[in-house]
Amino acid sequence: RYFLVGNNQAETKYRVLKIDRTEPKDLVIIDDRHVYTQQEVRELLGRLDLGNRTKMGQKGSSGLFRAVSAFGVVGFVRFLEGYYIVLITKRRKMADIGGHAIYKIEDTNMIYIPNDSVRITHPDEARYLRIFQNVDLSSNFYFSYSYDLSHSLQYNLTVLRMPLEMLKSETTQTRQESFDIFEDEGLITQGGSGVFGICSEPYMKYVWNGDLLDIIKNTVHHDWLLYIIHGFCGQSKLLIYGRPVYVTLIARRSSKFAGTRFLKRGANCEGDVANEVETEQILCDASVMSFTAGSYSSYVQVRGSVPLYWSQDISTMMPKPPITLDQADPFAHVAALHFDQMLQRFGSPIIILNLVKEREKRKHERILSEELVAAVTYLNQFLPPEHTIIYIPWDMAKYTKSKLCNVLDRLNVIAESVVKKTGFFVNRPDSYCSILRPDEKWNELGGCVIPTGRLQTGVLRTNCVDCLDRTNTAQFMVGKCALAYQLYSLGLIDKPNLQFDTDAVRLFEELYEDHGDTLSLQYGGSQLVHRVKTYRKIAPWTQHSKDIMQTLSRYYSNAFSDADRQDSINLFLGVFHPTEGKPHLWELPTDFYLHHKNTMRLLPTRRSYTYWWTPEIIKHLPLPYDEVICAANLKKLIVKKFHKYEEEIDIHNEFFRPYELSSFDDTFCLAMTSSARDFMPKTVGIDPSPFTVRKPDETGKSVLGNKSNREEAVLQRKTAASAPPPPSEEAVSSSSEDDSGTDREEEGSVSQRSTPVKMTDTGDSAKVTENVVQPMKEVYGINLSDGLSEEDLSIYSRFVQLGQSQHKQDKSSQQLCSRCPDGVIKLTPISAFSQDNIYEVQPPRVDRKSTEIFQAHIQASQGIMQPLGKEDTSMYREYIRNRYL
């Protein structure tokens, strides 16, 4: 047998799964439905070890040994022999949302379950195993133990805010219907100290191991089920005068009709489209970590192939194969199914931004535009006028070629109108400052305003032919516009507007480019060819050669490796199940029949051609049906009662682990990009605000990022007074492209970017020094040659005294310390270890007023505000009168 022992983060609760290894082809798993303590688990494993040792007659050796240590179970899979178990053996923390860690899978391990004695070998098993492992689980697969990654932040927090009375009635109802030991275990009801917890079913469209977990879903406790998503996850820190704001980007790739570029186009018979990705940008004030007390905002947008039956034949070996419409669909049946799904998940309005070419010498992309317009026009006839699908066609390629038109300015206009229609999610009511300083753009904002904040209703759906390069740039512009509104809603900027070349937008642009590159590699086989800089027309000349290489890489991948990748995805997602006596996966001429179920059997129900939506969905628009409190949605929730001090719901204990010795490497393992460190110029005296527009050569990354260019940057700053106007971005970027450049290249870049200082005889040395060295006052803020005041000297002496107390003191230093001035806190070492830095400190006395102020500050973070006194009110009125009236 295999024994799978799982524990919680605090290592206080354990569960055990028993996996039988005597069955050659069946999976027998027993969950004993008991929660063990650490002591009980040790005793259980000790008894098993002793029993097996005696049975096997090996008294000297161990009867039980550890096969593998893992962080979670991806699932169970079977080809033609027995079952395998897939385990996560390495993980890396990628983001933190409200204290919930999001991890990326770094490595996995597949273990064959049946014993060698009962194994029935099959010649094709090894080939299936190789195809299955071709899906690299260490490449952009993510999971979280406590946060539902398959749903948006809006869904997760809306469900959390469900009224308590409804939860209580729901719990009693489920208990009366079926008594389950899982639901009632460990319930403690001591004097009303219980806390209700909600767990929702994942949205299976974005779950990639759903098929692998299906076999154990109904036999084991739901804590064993770890759902993974595929796509992208990145987090960066925006420092606003020291206040940390986390910008998180999560992309969820659909597992329905998934595949590679030319092999998966259009939609299948169920309305699932190829390359469908939901991108969510989350903004949170990182100074408060919890969902209930913190400030959170999110905005969701979608990309996906044109929802029609169409394909491209790659057997012709052309870079752009001709587009063909495979089936006539006069009543837009497939598009109706697709938009019905979107109305259910996002509400209305659904806005389509179609970036496909409109004018071409030979009809190529325009075929899709014409069909999509016809489909949307047909479907809109029957929808209520206020909920119709909004269609925005815009030929981005044509505008890019035009010298008169700025592509991003036009996209910015579209983005403003889109965000105004859909709104965005924020979990707190509008700030009082938006009433004091009314903004026209803010007052026109759409969405749904509720007492606890705002909800996003509707979504933008962007597409081009591939949904890669053009789509990513358009999504970035819409995201940038939404980011401005999100920052404004949290009270971090005074107007909902962000400009290019600020640290905030540069940080956001880098995040979106990483997002675009990752999604492009997954679907197209190469990174992005055209980036935001390309459309801004500020890309360096070296970018053109990179674009050519990416195009060739994409073509090679599509021609030679995509077919194998498609087979792997079909096997991994359970689209194809190997069966004895039926054709193997590599023998199939096409996978069309696997993805279009109506080709294998007649579908039981046929939808109406006019009432093409689900009736319940239309009743609740513009709100998304998935977030409405109704009987159907309540069935998807598991409600459980906890004691309020349990580890499972105590974020502080979970995150900081106060009862164990933890290392900084584990606690601060997430090294995210920071606007202050990576984007803010290092020149002293620069405005540290991330919303200040910088010159192209002022960013911390392009100039100071490379060691070879650091000295040049210093020289450039020193000779700024005598230097010519700053160079263009092309010169800066091209000289900083290659870190390992030769001496000749370095000399060339110095001559381009700074004026050489001419060294003359001694008579001119004063003049040269004046040009090269900045005065001390400008660099340090004070003139160091002046004598220090007594107050500054006393502060410095205290600082030195504290520094000496950091190390273990010998007798001489203790004698020195005895003569130290009064008012310095004396630190006494209490540890016998030489490298320990824990000291006994006598805390300073705090007066009563300071204690009251601190207690009020703590209560304010929990949402308990102190009533304002007369002095506070009059002071605030005076401030408003002087500031605005």
Image (cartoon, rainbow, N blue to C red):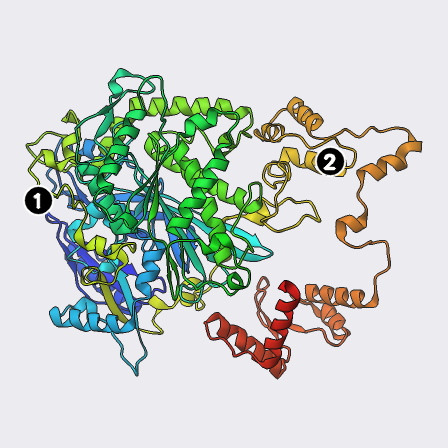
How far apart, in angstroms, are the residues tagged by discs 1 and 2? 75 Å
| Badge 2: residue crowd in 10 Å (few <14, some 14–19, many ≥20) | some
Q: Which mark is on residue 715?
A: 2
Task: Give the answer, above or below, for where 178 lies relative to 749.
Answer: below
The answer, for residue 67, to whether it is visible in the render is no
Q: Position of residue 41 (x, y in %)?
A: 26, 65
Q: Are marks 1 and 2 in contact (CB under 8 Å)?
A: no
**Left or right: 220 with respect to 120?**
right
The amino acid type, in three-letter code, at marker 1 is: Thr
In the rendered view, does 685 fall on the left or right side of 248? right
Helix, strand or loop at mark 2 = helix
* Residue 727 shows up from this direction: yes
Graded by Cα atoms within 10 Å as few (under 14), some (14 to 19) or many (20 or more), the crowding at tag 1 reads few
At label 2, which amino acid type do we have? Leu
Q: Is residue 465 above or below residue 414?
A: above
Front one among 659 and 473: 473
Q: Which of marks 1 and 2 is nearer the N terminus?
A: 1
- Return the x and y of residue 825 as percentages of the image width and height: 68, 74
Find residue 418 and report its image quarter. Answer: top left
Tell me where residue 254 sits by quadrant: top left
Q: Which of 162 and 67 is in front in this view?
A: 162
Per the image, the residue denoted by label 1 is: 605
Work out whether 31 lies above or below 164: above
